[in-house]
Image: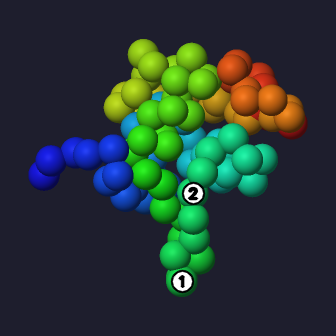
Amino acid sequence: MVQTDDEILTTGEAAALCGVSRSTLRRAVAQGHLQAWHTPGKHLRFTRAACMEFAKSLGRVDLIGQPQPFGAPATTVTGQNSGHSEAALSR
């Protein structure tokens, strides 16, 4: 399968791509740090481009495409700004 910027990802796929947890992605969407939409069944969907931009804004480019290790601290989303640090996503 060819991966394009407009490829649609599930929450799990997007989390794996960004190197963060699924709950971090949901929080980022709720706080406006990451664009996504809901399917009619209420599932979140993301574009690959939006996920790449989100990972870059966190400084997580090194983790793009790397799975979140079990037991590793999750990246969190907080604050009003673009959240250029992991701590910026936790509030």
Residue 75 in sight from this viewpoint:
yes
Residue 58: x %, y % from top left? 61, 23
Task: Give residue 12's position: percent from left, percent from top.
Answer: 45, 52
Q: Residue at the left extreme?
A: 1
Q: Residue at x 49, y 43 (%)?
A: 50
State the residue at coordinates (56%, 34%): 54
Q: Secondary structure at mark 2?
A: loop
Tell me the residue that label 2 is attached to: 36
Where residue 20 sits, quadrant-wise, is: top right
Labelled pair 2, 1 in contact (Cβ < 8 Å) = no
- The local secondary structure at tag 1 comes to loop
The color scheme shown is rainbow
Which residue is tagged 1? 40
Decide which of 23, 30 is in the foreground and name it: 30
- Please tell me whether residue 60 is drawn above or below residue 35 in the rendered image: above
Q: Is residue 9 above or below residue 5?
A: below
Eyeballing the image, is 23 above or below 81?
below
Q: Quadrant of residue 52?
A: top left
Amino acid type for the residue under numbered disc 1: Pro
Q: Left of 32 or right of it: where is 36?
A: left
Q: Amino acid at mark 2?
A: Ala
- How many numbered marks are there? 2
